[in-house]
Amino acid sequence: MYPLEPRAGEIVRLAAQGAWLTAETEALLSAIGVGPGWHCLDLACGLGDVTRLMAARAGATGRVVGLDLERRFLDHAGACAAGSVAYLQGDACRTGLPEASFDLVHGRFLFTGGERFAALLAEAIRLVRPGGVVALQEQDLACMACFPPHPAFARLKALLGAGLEQSGTGRSVARRLFGMLRQAELQDVRYRPFLVGCQAGDPQADWLPDTVDSLRGPLLRAGLTSCAVLDETMAACRTHLADPGTTATIYAVVQVWGRKGGGEAASAD
Ligand SMILES: C[S@@+](CC[C@H](N)C(=O)[O-])C[C@H]1O[C@@H](n2cnc3c(N)ncnc32)[C@H](O)[C@@H]1O
């Protein structure tokens, strides 16, 4: 299950993140060559931000499916849908969809680790047709830092790591992604990393405090902090990030994609 609390602000948080990742996601879809007529699947589509970008490229002759576990996200995605998009509720590791039925199977920020990730990759490869593309994007939080440094920022970074661990999410697979796709049956595996950072006033500037707030329940239940300390630390961090002299690197995103052997590379209509 999604590790973050089902709080009112979660859809706003995901939508804001989707918006600031649009340009780099478009760059990924361009590098893959997604175009008219493509059949695409967005695994763990969340609010459907990437699903919509795929649909805009695939056009009326294409077919795009967004799949997610969470009904509340799919309802939001469906309300924003345009063009030929279908949203399905299901487990990305066991979709039940027919094999070899997509030109592109994509997943961004699946928050899965270890064996779950291996199962997900196997399912993505099963679903893509020979010659089609599997593309994955994952966050790498190791580069998170602010300048000048601040103890509240460092404390929230540590709590984020502990909270993700506590909620069973496991460590990020971002750094292992390239090797995992190479070890799978994928060919021509490509690697495209980029960095998300911020200065005061950017929408990204609240990502760390807001994401830690989403993990408030698991953090409190595990005794890793108290409400009062968390509120105080978040306020101090937000004050520092709102200072016009502060900059921060938030996370790196690793985009990796490769082609399934045994068929023609996909082309637009
Ligand atoms: C951080 S959100 C990312 C959403 C979207 N891919 C994006 O980049 O905006 C993680 C998503 O993964 C979904 N998710 C987690 N595990 C899943 C699974 N096993 N099957 C389907 N969806 C899953 C969650 O419901 C959530 O929507």
Image (cartoon, grey):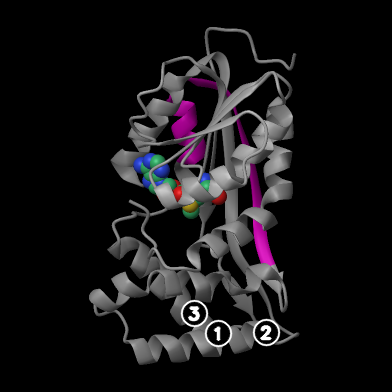
- The residue closer to the viewer here, 247 or 69, is 69
Q: Give the foreground label among 1 and 3.
A: 1
- Residue 173's place in the image compared with 55, above or below, is below
Q: Which residue is mark 2?
A: 242
- Residue 91's place in the image compared with 258, above or below, is below
Q: Which residue is mark 3?
A: 154
Q: Residue at x 72, y 26 (%)?
A: 59
Label 1 CB-ligand 1 distance < 8 A: no
- Residue 41's place in the image compared with 220, above or below, is above
State the separation of the CA atoms marked 1 and 3: 9 Å
Q: Is residue 107 visible?
A: yes
Of the residues shown, which amino acid type is indicated by label 2? Ala
Of the residues shown, which amino acid type is indicated by label 3? Ala
State the separation of the CA atoms marked 2 and 1: 9 Å
Other-residue count near label 1 (Cα within 10 Å), few / some / many at <14 / 14–19 / ≥20: many
**Element on which disc 2 rests:** loop
Other-residue count near label 3 (Cα within 10 Å), few / some / many at <14 / 14–19 / ≥20: some
Q: Who comes first in sequence, dot 1 or dot 3?
A: 3
Of the residues shown, which amino acid type is indicated by label 1? Cys
Residue 225 placement (x, y as % from top left)? 32, 83
Magenta residue span: 177-197
Label 2 CB-ligand 1 distance < 8 A: no
- Residue 161 placement, left or right of 20: left
Q: Who comes first in sequence, dot 2 or dot 1?
A: 1
Q: Residue at x 75, y 85 (%)?
A: 244
